[in-house]
Image (tube, rainbow, N blue to C red):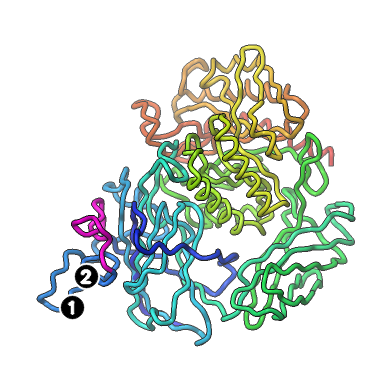
Amino acid sequence: MKYNKTILILTTSLFLVSTHLIKAQELLTNVYGRETYSLNGKWQYIVDPYETGFYDYRFKEKHEKDPGAYWNSGVPKDKTAMVEHGYDDKNTLNVPGDWNSQDPIFLYYEGTVWYKKSFDYKKKAESNRLFLYFGAVNYQAEVYLNGKKLGSHKGGFTPFQFEIDDSILKEKDNYVVVKVDNKRHKDEVPTVNTDWWNFGGITRDVMVVETPAVFVEDYFIQLNTETVALKPNMKKAEVTGWVKLNGAKTGEEVTIEIPELKAKTTITYSNSLTPFSMKLSKVELWSDVNPKRYELVISVADDVLKEKIGLRKIEVDGKKILLNGRPVFLRGICMHEEVPTEMRRAKTREDALELLGWAKELNCNFIRLAHYPHNEQIVRAADSLGILLWSEIPVYWTIDFGNAAVLEKAKVQLKEMITRDRNKPSVIIWSVGNETPVSPTRTEFMKNLVLAAKSMDSTRLISAALEVHYNKDKNTINDPLGAYTDVVSVNEYLGWYIGLPSYCQTAQWETIYDKPLIFSETGAGAKGGFHADSLTRWSEEYQEWFYKEQVKMMKRMPDNYTGLTPWILADFRSPKRNNPTYQEGWNRKGLIDEKGNKKKAFYELKKYYDELATEQSKEK
């Protein structure tokens, strides 16, 4: 099928639609394994800092058919029409992509931008259904098609979609409007204060998804290891899971198959999450050293959904983290979803492979995706490369912990993150937040998120970056949230924010929790190419010294020390970092600078990870 042109209008807004807020629907999983039509490319736009396209002069939401509303095309019906907006090819932005990196006028911009794109579309079958899917829009999106509102979504890092009604769609000259707004607010997730760039726009893929009338909406599959000993190559195994259909009636037959393993079963749908199980005569387990994947095929009526899956088990046994029944040490690094050499959001598989390639050069087997769910391209690439992942929602620093509505917003983002990636073998830890200040109100808030995550997925570990009680003689990890997480994770900056790197030489650590311990951050800033003696802050030599002392300290850690994710893989943009000589709007704690050059500390950490990898291979 050939498609002639594409016009889609998307808009950014700071405000909720007061009269008819229509929320996004239950999330479609494995969108990249479905029939899709991309709406990526050039989009026309209007910058609208005063929300003129959304509110009238009395600051009330405009009527749906108001020609002055920016969700309408802006094309006058005749020469007497009075229309004060319009879209033109002289103002375009690339989608997916942040607006900040595409034009200097957007560098620090926070507010509303309206994007527009038109498209022609003819369904492959009359009975098929269509959905408009967004990988992510930061932060709030109001979505319209041909002047009719489809719905709204909040959250800058998780996907959403709306079903397209046949009465709205035409074969020719459709236009979709999405209103997007990246303003920060105290009662949002994240809140107003973050240490990363507030990239605005339609930052991930946009596509029309076409499905049969009855289709597989969601599913879950896992290795059942209750009665079988885990081995890298198993001669006997079982998988269990569930299937959720859309548009089906009770009694619909569903087939689940793993062709390579000659495993197949047919179940009868029960109009809810319908369980299944399959015996496997053999299976090769997915791991960081052998990322073996199998094609899974789920069929119902006219729908056939395919996805590559990895079968593995992650668990805690006392003070250790076990992958497929064996202790694994997490040689990690933190990473932002940002391409430093182009000062933009990462958005493609090529971007993902570049960032993950740097981590592989460092000899990492683990990455903490900070501080929000990353692009699905990154997770899928990690699946193929055998990189373990920590995925996190942006409950960051001082959000409004006493606000019940904020808790619900955080739960929505948690659900969307887990729903999208629950079948990705690379994700082993769901994180519910970072460096949240200790108080009874905060701990109750965070405990609720931990329990919510466990209820949605009991097969992975739950953690969060906790607080540390620093003391001259001994640093104690006693954050009360640690009582609820599976893994105790803490950020520490001895030698950067506390003393000099030599401070690490006498530092002692203890934790009140008999659980695996991950140092989820540590790091020091250095401007790439600036060289001096090791006592000079911001020099590569200071950062190198910092890592030397950190490694020595890590080698003295208690026996529950199971992982390290230093801050951070590469320098990234942050408006909080304003030293005019060494920062200039960059957080300089990266091991790779903004030009893609590796700093001296990169090789110091790599040496440590090479030693750990060698030791682990001998143990196996």
> Of helix, strand and loop, which one carries label 2?
loop
Amino acid marked by disc 1: Lys
Query: Residue 503 in the image: x percent, y percent?
Result: 60, 14
Q: Nearer the viewer, residue 413 or 313?
A: 413
Badge 1, how many Cα within 10 Å: few under 14, some, many 20+? few
Image side of residue 501 versus residue 342, left or right: right
The residue drawn where x is 59% and y is 35% is 443
Magenta range is 46-63
Query: Residue 286 in the image: x percent, y percent?
Result: 75, 55
Residue 67 image label? 2
Amino acid marked by disc 2: Pro
> Of helix, strand and loop, which one carries label 1?
loop
Whether 588 is drawn above or below 10: the answer is: above
Ranked by sequence position, the earlier of labels 2 and 1 is: 2
Query: Residue 40 in the image: x percent, y percent?
Result: 42, 65
Disc 2 and disc 1 in contact, CB within 8 angstroms: yes
Q: Nearer the viewer, residue 92 or 10?
A: 10
Q: Main secondary structure of the magenta part?
A: loop
The residue drawn where x is 44% and y is 41% is 191
Q: Which residue is mark 1?
A: 77
Residue 489 image label? none
Q: Nearer the viewer, residue 134 or 527?
A: 134
Let me know if residue 56 is in the magenta part.
yes
Image side of residue 58 versus residue 130, left or right: left
* Residue 459 shows in the view: yes
Residue most toward the left? Answer: 80
* Residue 597 shows in the view: no
Marks 2 and 1, how far apart at CA: 9 Å
- Examine the image and state in which quarter residue 507 appears: top right
Whether 463 is drawn above or below 276: the answer is: above
The residue drawn where x is 64% and y is 38% is 332
